[in-house]
Image (cartoon, helix red, strand yellow):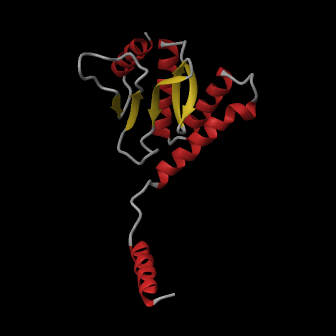
Amino acid sequence: MSPKKDMQKSAKSTTTINKQSKGFTDEERAAMRERAQELKAPTRRGPRAGKANGESDVLAKIAEMPESDRAMAERLHAVIKASAPALSPRTWYGMPAYAKEGKVVCFFQSAQKFKTRYATLGFSEKANLDEGAMWPVAFALNELTAAEEARIGGLVKQAVS
């Protein structure tokens, strides 16, 4: 190898070592791994797997959450099921989610999932929440009171209408 090529190779490997990766966080990588497993699950379970397995997956994810997020997720699960029985519970990137015709309409992200100070109730583009030129698609949750539960129930009903 010529001295010039040695210098180029050496400089290249030095800059690679000195740079810190600014890619995905550990939490984001874990969510992507969970999503890949979710996509493979129906083929492992067979053609008859359906709503029951989705619900058990959601309940298992909720059970893994820290107490404050778990209590909120359990209440949200009940509110969403009561407000829109047509939605099917399932997991989505390792989070409890609710789908219509296989497409996620809304989801719950615990505060612990990405180490944030609040949990999130989010709605996908499949949710019918359009209102003019701008509308919210995610809501921060610190606690659930009767007022928040009523508002969430209304939003979920509107989302599936």
38 relative position to 12: left or right = right
Q: Where 160 falls versus 56 (above or below)?
A: above
User: Residue at horizontal 36%, vertical 32%?
Assistant: 141
Q: Is residue 97 above or below residue 24?
A: above
Number of on-image labels: 0
Q: Viewer-proximal residue, 56 or 22?
A: 22
Residue at the spot 75% in from the left edge and 22% down from the top edge = 48
Q: Is residue 127 visible?
A: yes
Residue 72 visible in the current orientation: no
In the figure, residue 53 lies in which quadrant?
Answer: top right
Where's residue 3, x and y in %?
44, 90
Which of the two residues, 102 or 117, is positioned nearer the viewer here? 102
In which quadrant is the C terminus drawn? top left
Residue 139 rendering spot, x and y as whole percentages:
34, 30
Residue ID at (44%, 53%)? 24
Residue closest to the far top: 161
- The residue most toward the front is 2
Q: Residue lying furthest left in this view?
A: 133
Q: To which quarter of the image does residue 146 belong? A: top left
Residue sitting nearer the eye, 149 or 33: 33
Q: Position of residue 19 (x, y in %)?
A: 38, 70
Residue plotted at (52% across, 40% down): 65
